Structures are given as C-alpha cells and as structure tokens.
Image: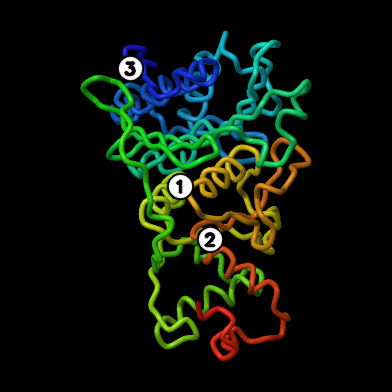
C-alpha cells in the first residue's frame, strides 16, 4: 500500500496507548481508501483469493487489508489481534494493553460494484490468553467503530459514551473531527433486510415484516421503505445518520440457523457503537452486548437501530406462535 497516506487521529492525547492504536488503524483506513479510489488500476481487488474459516469467499482486498493491519500494528500496544480473515488469534505484543477484533474489509462482495464498503473494529482490554481477550460479553469493549469507504472516507466510533465522527481530508491526508451522526433517534420509516429470504425466516420476523409491508392499511398505520445494501458498514452508517432498523435473522437454511454475521468481529462492535448512539441491538430477543461467544468465529442473528424499533421486534417473539400479527393493532401493544 502507499504509505504517503498516513492517517492522523486527533483528540486522544490523554490516552496515549489508545491514541497510538487509533493512529495506526487510521493510517490503514486512509491507505485502503486510496487503493479503492484508484479503482483497481494496478490489480484486481475483487479477485477471489480463497475462503476464510467460515467458508465465506475472500477477495484480494480482504487479504491486502488484513496484512496491512497486522503490519501497521507491529510494535503497538495491541497484545492480541483477532481477524475475521484468520483462523486463530495472533499475539503481536506480549506486554500489550489491548485485544483488537477486526473485520478488515466488510462488504467485499461489493468491491466491483462501487458500493460503500468498510472495516469494523472493537477494542477490549487485553487478557492473559487469546480466548479470554475475545470470548467475553461485548459490554467489556472499551472502544469500537468502523471506517467506511464511500463518497467520503469516514471513521465513526465510540469510547463508550457518545459517538464521534472523523472525515479524511483528501488535501491534508488527515482525519478531521466533524459533527457526529444523530439520526438513530429519528422515527425513520426505513428498514433493511434481505427480503429474498422471506420464506426461510422464523414466524416472528415474517410477522414483523408483514406488518411493515401492509403499510398505512395495516396495524402500524403508516408506510415504510425497504433498504438493502448488503454491506453492514453502509447499513450502519445510514441508520446512524437518519434512523431506521436493520435485521439479519437466523433462518432455516443449512448453515444459517444463527445468521451469517460474526459476534466478535461484527455484531458486538456495531452493538457497542449503536448503544452509545442511543439505539439498541439484539439477536431478536437478547441484547447483543450480553452474549458470550463460544468460539472466535461464532455467529448470531442481528437486529439493531432505534431502541423502540428493536424492542418492537422482540415483542413479536414474545407473542404466542398462533397469534396473528394483525392483533397487534387491536391490542394496542405497539401503538406508541
């Protein structure tokens, strides 16, 4: 990668070790944005390079980004490095203070379609062993966030209290703090789900979506708009910016009982960020941040967005299986 793009990360002077990690991450974010912006002129970034431990295809840029993070974090305060693209945890610094979980390139299937992609990261206090660093509740996170490579290259993150946003200035090559997104509190009519899997979903999810589709003539009494980008970073950025809800349920297809999103690398970091922004995240019924993964690449269903919207989904799971969704309107259970 082109090291002239050295991402700066202001605002963490009081936390030198965390500041060091974020400067290194920001450098790779900036370099990756530069590589993507060149449109694959030098190499085919969308070329399939193999499969990862979960059986998902790896693109060339998945591997390039992962290698770049490992190189950038050498000598950093990161003790344990856990990547979606690697089978096991790498120990970078035996005396390091942090465990870093990362999806080096989220949404890589969209590389050749010029749709926004990104990276997701979560930072834990380092524990004695790799498993102890990452097989723990997401509430143990001390920071999480994502970089998004789109019309702007942005970092959106939290240290557990509120959300901050940085935009890469293409002139200075530095990340500049700007106003944070505040849209998650908006009563947005947008929802995101892969509707092609409708027939495979559990009944509560189908009932919830049926009521949205019924619009102003259904029990919700209003019209809704479906959005689906198939990039978790892009979906999160939209919801943080203008509200709504995202659903990736488990379903009855082989290998999809727990969905396809990974708890350690994707769901816990996103949940930590969303809750810091005033929203909620669950697996449909249980808070994501309370879940403890039983292995590094454990998967979980994911529902996140506005707090009331996520609670509403949980309500569909609470109802008797035989109860028609239309009764929601008659009972007034979700009329708020």
Say which residue label 3 marks: 5
Up the image or down, 171 lies above or below 316; here it is above
- The reply to whether residue 85 is in sight is no
- Outermost residue, front direction? 14
Quadrant of the image occupied by residue 200: bottom right
x then y, percent, for residue 82: 64, 27
Q: Earlier in the sequence, mark 2 or mark 3?
A: 3
Marks 2 and 3 sit apart, C-alpha to C-alpha, by 38 Å
Q: Which mark is residue 307?
A: 2
Q: Earlier in the sequence, mark 3 or mark 1?
A: 3
Query: Could you tell me which quadrant the N terminus lies in?
Result: top left
Residue mark closest to the camera, 2 vs 3? 2
x then y, percent, for residue 85: 60, 30
Q: Nearer the viewer, residue 228 or 122?
A: 122
Element type at marker 3?
A: loop
Task: Please say if the residues under marks 2 and 3 sit with CB atoms less than 8 Å apart.
Answer: no
Say which residue label 1 marks: 231
Near mark 3 (Cα within 10 A), the count class, few <14, some 14-19 or many ≥20, is many
Marks 3 and 1 sit apart, C-alpha to C-alpha, by 25 Å
């Amino acid at each position: 990668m082109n090291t002239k793009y050295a991402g700066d990360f202001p605002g963490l002077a009081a936390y030198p070790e965390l500041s060091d990690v974020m400067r290194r991450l920001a450098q790779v974010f900036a370099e990756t944005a530069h590589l993507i912006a060149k449109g694959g002129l030098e190499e085919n970034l969308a070329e399939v390079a193999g499969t990862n431990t979960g059986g998902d295809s790896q693109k060339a840029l998945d591997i390039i980004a992962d290698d770049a993070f490992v190189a950038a974090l050498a000598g950093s305060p990161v003790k344990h490095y856990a990547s979606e693209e690697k089978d096991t945890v790498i120990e970078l610094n035996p005396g390091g203070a942090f465990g870093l979980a990362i999806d080096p390139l989220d949404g890589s299937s969209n590389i050749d379609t010029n749709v926004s992609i990104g990276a997701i990261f979560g930072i834990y206090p380092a524990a004695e062993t790799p498993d102890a660093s990452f097989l723990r509740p997401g509430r143990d996170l001390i920071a999480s966030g994502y970089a998004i490579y789109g019309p702007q290259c942005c970092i959106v993150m939290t240290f557990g209290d509120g959300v901050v946003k940085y935009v890469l200035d293409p002139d200075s090559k530095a990340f500049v703090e700007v106003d944070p997104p505040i849209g998650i509190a908006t009563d947005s009519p947008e929802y995101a789900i892969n509707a092609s899997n409708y027939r495979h979903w559990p009944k509560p999810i189908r009932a919830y979506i049926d009521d949205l589709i019924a619009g102003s003539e259904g029990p919700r009494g209003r019209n809704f708009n479906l959005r689906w980008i198939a990039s978790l970073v892009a979906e999160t950025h939209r919801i943080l910016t203008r509200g709504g809800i995202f659903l990736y349920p488990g379903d009855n297809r082989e290998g999809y009982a727990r969905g396809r999103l990974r708890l350690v690398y994707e769901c816990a970091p996103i949940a930590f960020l969303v809750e810091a922004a005033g929203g909620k995240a669950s697996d449909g019924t249980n808070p994501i941040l309370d879940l403890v993964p039983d292995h590094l690449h454990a998967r979980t269903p994911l529902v996140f967005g506005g707090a009331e919207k996520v609670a509403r989904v949980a309500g569909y799971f609470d109802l008797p299986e035989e109860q028609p969704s239309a009764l929601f309107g008659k009972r007034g259970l979700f009329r708020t």
